[in-house]
Structures are given as C-alpha cells and as structure tokens.
Image (cartoon, rainbow, N blue to C red):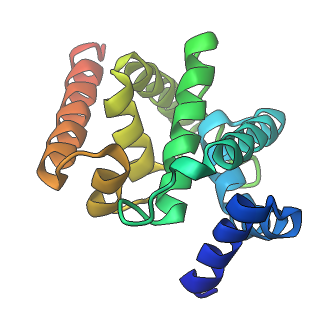
Amino acid sequence: MPLEQEQKWIRAILRQGDRQAADLLIRRYYDEIFAFMYRQSGDREDALDLTQECFIAALGSLHTYDRRKAAFRTWLYHIAVHKLIDRRRRSRPVTVPLEQDTPVPGDFTALLEDRELLRRAGELVCQADSLDQEIFRLRLYAERSFPDIAAVCGQSEAMVKSRYYRLLAYIRKELTEHDP
C-alpha cells in the first residue's frame, strides 16, 4: 500500500472524522500490532485488549502524529510499547510460552531451564527504565531498525544502540552470575 494512501486516510480522519478511513487505517496494521502484542503478553485475550487500547490511543492522539519525525507504523509501535509497559507496571511480568506444536529437541529438563531463563530475562527487562524497555521491545519483538527506533524515541541512533547493548550486557551478566 502506498504511503500516500495512508496519509490520505490520516487527513480524512483528522479533518472530517472519517470512520471509514479510520477503519481502513486500523485494518492496515491490526494483525501486525496484534502479533507484536501477543509475542509480548503470551495471552490472546491480553493481546486483544492491548491491541484495542493501542488503536484507541492512536486515534485519540492522531493530531500529534508528525510524519516528518517518523512513519505512521513506527509511531504506532511507539504507542504499542507504551501500552505494554503500562500494563506490566500494573501487573507481574508475563513471559511468552513456547509454541505447543513446536517439536522440542533435547530433553525436557533443558526445556524447563530455557523457560526459566526466559522468565528471568523478562523480569530483568521489566526492571529497566521505560526508555530502555521501549528500545529493547521495538528491536527484539517488533524487529525495528535502530534508525526507526531512534525516530520513535526522539534519540540519536548512537544513543539507542548504546542503551540497547547496555541492557543486553546487563541481562547477560545477571543471568550468568546467578547460574548454579
């Protein structure tokens, strides 16, 4: 879909409150944002709620979107990450379960250790400040590039990389120091 069409929808929503344009814009990104939310929450119902919250917030603050700063998709991920962070602040962190239909190589104890490692890593990420969490989630789960993340966060690309790799180093250090 050409970006020009996306910008037409945004203008129509802002100028006339065009519900059809809003519906088309949401449909364009719904599956992608839902998948991102699901990978983060591990729960279908939570992912549906978070996705809805994300789009409600996006439409409510659409007047603040500036296409010179970031693409709409990037701006939408920024909102999605903040919805996740807000939800995690209100509840205990949840890790994403392994897919049930994925064949499991190796023995079962190794699988349990990997799940525990993922849980501990998730807890460490949730303890980081919100900017570090946003950078980490956009990079790892949304698979966004460093320039995209820098645009979303209003930071330099070098600062984004520095914070991302510092958090990775911290997680690695914490997980290896506490291994039996």
Q: Nearer the viewer, residue 158 or 63?
A: 63
| Position in image of residue 102 (x %, y %) | 68, 55
| Horizontal arrangement in the rendering, residue 82 relative to residue 37 (left or right) | left
The residue closer to the viewer here, 1 or 64, is: 64
Q: Residue at x 33, y 31 (%)?
A: 131
Rendered residue at 55%/36% (across/down):
111
- Which picture quadrant has residue 86? top right
Residue 135: % across, % down: 35, 42
Q: Is residue 92 above or below residue 109?
A: above
Viewer-side residue, 8 vs 125: 8
- Is 119 drawn above or below residue 160 in the view shown? above
Name the residue nearer the viewer: 129 or 19. 19
Q: Is residue 34 above or below residue 165?
A: below
Residue 123, how many percent across, how many down?
Answer: 45, 19
Q: Does residue 113 lie above or below 11 as drawn?
A: above
- Tell me where residue 133 appears, x and y as whole percent: 39, 32
Residue 31 visible in the picture? no
The residue at the point 17 percent across, 34 percent down is 166
Q: Residue at x 52, y 48 (%)?
A: 64
Quadrant showing the C terminus = top left
- Asked if residue 86 lies left or right of residue 9, the reply is left
